[in-house]
Amino acid sequence: MPFIRFVREERDVKCLKGANLREVALKEGLELYGFKGSIGNCGGCGQCITCFVAIEGGDKNSLSPLTEVEKIKLRNRPSNWRLACQCLVNSSLVVLTKPQAPPANCQNLVQEALSKVLPK
Ligand code: FES
């Protein structure tokens, strides 16, 4: 089973292969949304673009391919950003939630998360 390492939260969460990244995060009680998304989001339809995550470490195959919605909505965003609601987990990965508002020590947290081996 894949593990999702949430950088900001410093948590490793096990999930089923094919699990929806948004649903896993919410089920675990993680704060996926910024202010705008927390007061109103589309519920996972890919329309509100408030569920941004950054995939760290460069393994793009750890998630399902970009959906057609993401190709449009993420056009002007960094190439490692995804919409959590559109992502199915293929294999273990490292994720930064709310990359639009990174923590002050973001680079250190990411480097530390990437340096540790994910559980199998
Ligand atoms: S929850 Fe609205 S785009 Fe992901």
Image: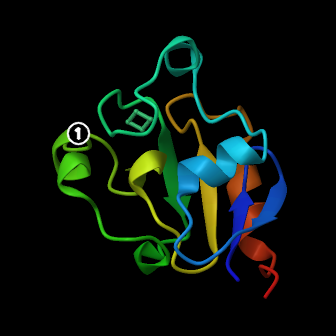
Which is nearer the eye, 117 or 67?
67
Q: Can you say whether 38 is above or below 101 in the image?
A: above
- What colouring style does the render use? rainbow
Circle 1 residue? 73
Q: Can you say whether 80 is above or below 51 in the image?
A: below
Location of residue 80 by image quarter: bottom left
Mark 1 CB lies closer than 8 A to ligand 1: yes
Q: Quadrant of ligand 1?
A: top left
Which is nearer the eye, 70 or 100?
70
Tell me the quarter of the image containing the N terminus. bottom right
Location of residue 101 by image quarter: top right
Q: Amino acid at mark 1?
A: Lys
Tell me the quarter of the image containing the C terminus. bottom right
Q: Is residue 51 left or right of residue 98?
A: left
Which is nearer the eye, 30 or 98?
30
Question: Residue 67, percent across and down?
Answer: 25, 58
Q: Is residue 78 left or right of residue 87?
A: left
Q: Please report the residue visible at 44 percent of the width from the left and 59 percent of the height from the top.
A: 87
Q: Please report the residue visible at 53 percent of the width from the left and 59 percent of the height from the top.
A: 20
Q: Can you say whether 10 is above or below 51 in the image?
A: below
Question: Residue 63, percent across and down?
Answer: 45, 71
Which is nearer the eye, 13 or 43?
43
Q: Please report the residue visible at 35 percent of the width from the left and 27 percent of the height from the top.
A: 48
Question: Residue 44, percent across and down?
Answer: 43, 39
